[in-house]
Image (cartoon, helix red, strand yellow):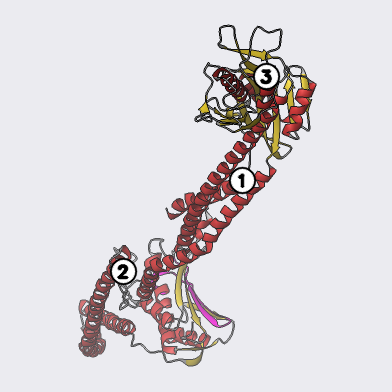
Amino acid sequence: MRTVRAVPAVLAALVTTAALLTGCGVGPSGVEAAGPAPGGVAPGTTLYFVGQDGALRPELRETGRLGTVVDALALLLTGPGPASDLTTAIPGPPAPVPVVAARVTSIEIWLPFTAAEVPATGVDQIVCTALGVHRQSGGDPAATVQIRFTVPEPGSDRPRECPIPG
Amino acid sequence: MIGLRRLGLRSRLIVVLVAVTVAGAAAAAWASAVSAGSAQTAQTRERLTGSVVATVESVAPQLTFPADESTLGTLRSAIGPDTAARAGALVARDGRIEALVSDELQAAVGGGDGVFTQQVVAEGMPWLVIGTPVMVIEPDGTRRRSGIEVYTAADLTGIDRELGALSLAAAGAAALTLPMSLLLAVLSANTVLRPVRELRATARRLAAGDLTARGRAQGRDELADLTATVDEMAESLQASMAEIRRMQADARRFVADVSHELRTPLSTLSAVLEVLDSTTAALGENVPDDARESAALAIAETHRLIRLVEDLMEVSRLDAGTAELRLEEIDLAAAVADCVRVRGWADLVTLSATGPVPARLDPRRVDVIVANLVGNALRHGRPPVRIEVTADGDRVEIEVTDAGPGLPEDVLPHVFARFYKADAARTRSPGSGLGLAIALQNARLHGGDVGAENRVEGGARFVVRMPREGGTR
C-alpha cells in the first residue's frame, strides 16, 4: 500500500519538472485586442472662420494631409481668402507664425499679438482650430488651450475651450 | 515504480519524502516562473503596441490622404523592419511580414477599430505580430476607418531566451531543495525507523530462543504500543515455556523413576522364573502341558517387560541429555557383523560391505542402532534382510532392507514415533515400540540421521547416515 501511495508523489514530481522545463517559452497565441487604433490621417485641415451671422464656421482646407497645429494656425492667420463668404476676426496683415507647445492635455500658443488686438471671436477661432487638429491627430478630446499674448491682460492666459461642439 | 516495493521501508520513506518536497518546490518555482513569464510577455506586448501606435500618430498628420504610394512608404519606414502598410490594392512591405500575418489577424484588423496582436512561431522563431487600422478622426471626435492598415512583426527571441533562463532558474531552485529534503528525509526516517530496528532485534533474539529479550518502549506512539505488546508476548511466552519445560522434566523424571523402580523387582522376578524354568525342565513329563505353557509364557512376557523397561531407561537418558558418546576407533563393517552374529541372526541376514570401514563412533550405540533396525526388519518385514555398509568421504551409511510388504504411506511419517502402532488391531508385538525411536536418537547423538522409505521393488529400506567422525556434523 505504501508503494501505491508513493506512485502519485513520484509522478507529480516528474510531471512538474517536465512542465517546468518545457512550459515556459513564447508559444503561438490567438488574436488579442490591444487598445484603440491610432488616428491622424485626414484629407485636409479644418479652420474656423466667422460666418455672416457672426457665429464660428468650420471650413475644410484640402491640403491633402492633416498637418500640425502650427500649420493650421499659419493657414488660419492668412485668412479665408477673397472668394469665401466667411470672414476672420484675427487682425491682419499676415503676422509671423505663432509658437505652439502641444502637450497631452493642454496646448500653449504664443501669439504675435497683444491681448487687446484680438477680439474674443478671434481667440475662439484660434482655440477651435488648434483643438480640432489636436483632437484629429489622436490627442485628448478634453484638452484645453492656453494663449500667451505679447502683452497679456488679467486672465488672458486662462485655459480655454472651443465654444462650439466639434 | 514497481522497484519501489523492493526497497526497504527506510528507502521508501526517504524516496516519498524527497519526492513530495521536490514536487512542492518545483510546483512553487514553476508557478512563479509562469506568472513572471506571462507578466513579462504582457509587458513586452504592451510596450511594442504602444510604440507602434505612437509612431503612427506621430507621422500620420504629415501623411498624404487619401493614401498614395508615398503615404504607405513613409508609414512603413517610420515603423521599422518587418512591416507592411496597406491601403486597398496599394502595399508597401518590408521583410518577411506577409508570411507572419495570419488570416485570423487580418480578419480582426479588417473588421475592427482597434490594435490586435498575435504571437506566432515561424521556423522556430517566436514573433509578436501587431496589426492595426489607421483611423480618421473627425473634428467632432467621431472615428472612421481610413482604409489604411499597418502590420508589423517584432522578434521575441530575446524574451523567449529570458523566459528560458527564468525556467532554468526555477528548476535550479527546485533542485536546490533536493539535498536539503534528502537530509531531512534521512533524519526523519531514522527517527521513525529506530524503534522498528530495535523491535526487529528483539524479535530476532526471541526467534533465536532468547526468551529474556525485551524491547524498550519509548514515547506514546503506535510503535511504542507495538514494542510493549511484543514485550508482553515475550513475557507470556517465557512463562509458558518455563511451565512446559518443568512439566516435561517432571514427566521424564517420572518415567526414569518408574523404570528404575521396576528394574529391581523385574530382575528378581526374572531370576525366580529362571528357577521355575529349570524346575519344569527337570520335572520333565511330570508337569502338565498347560502348566509348562504358562511357565513359558510368563518367562517370555517377563523378558519382554525387562526389555521394555531397559528401552524406557535408554529413552529417558537420551531425553534427559545425560547420554554420553564413548567414541572409539572401530571398523563399522566388523561392528555390524558382530551385532548380527551375537544376536544369532547370521542365518537370517545377508551382510555386505566393500571392506573394512574405519570410523570413530560409539560401538555400543552402533550396536543398538543396528540391532533395532534389523530386529524391526525381521519382525515386520520378510527375509531376505540385507545390511549394506558403505562409506562416502567423511560419511558412513548402514542400509537395512527387507523383502516384506513395505511401510504403508500413512505410517511412513510416524514410523520413528514412540509406541506408534502401524496396525491398530495388532496391539501386541514382540517389540517394545521404542526401537526405531531409540535408533534415530542414537544416530542423532552421533550427528547423523535415519531415513525410512519404501523400495521400488518392494520392501522397506532404512538408511542410517552418520559422520565418520561421530559427533561432528
Q: Residue at x 25, y 78 (%)?
A: B242
Q: Earlier in the sequence, mark 3 or mark 1?
A: 1
Q: Residues within 10 Å of mark 2 (few under 14, many from 20)?
A: many
**Which residue does the numbered mark 3 point to in the structure image?**
A92
Q: To which chain does the residue with label 1 belong?
A: A
Q: Is residue B157 above or below residue B221?
A: above
Q: Is residue B304 within the magenta segment?
A: no
Q: To which chain does the residue with label 3 belong?
A: A
Cβ–Cβ under 8 Å for marks 2 and 1: no
The magenta stretch is B378-404
Tag of residue B227: 2
Cβ–Cβ under 8 Å for marks 3 and 1: no
Quadrant position of the C terminus of chain A in the picture: top right
Q: Residues within 10 Å of mark 3 (few under 14, many from 20)?
A: few
**Which residue does the numbered mark 1 point to in the structure image?**
A22
Residue kind at label 3, given as amino acid type: Gly
Q: Residue at x 45, y 75 (%)?
A: B450
Query: Residue B378 location, x and y as percent?
Result: 41, 74
User: Do we see residue B459 in this rendering?
Assistant: no
Between circles 3 and 2, the one closer to the viewer is 3
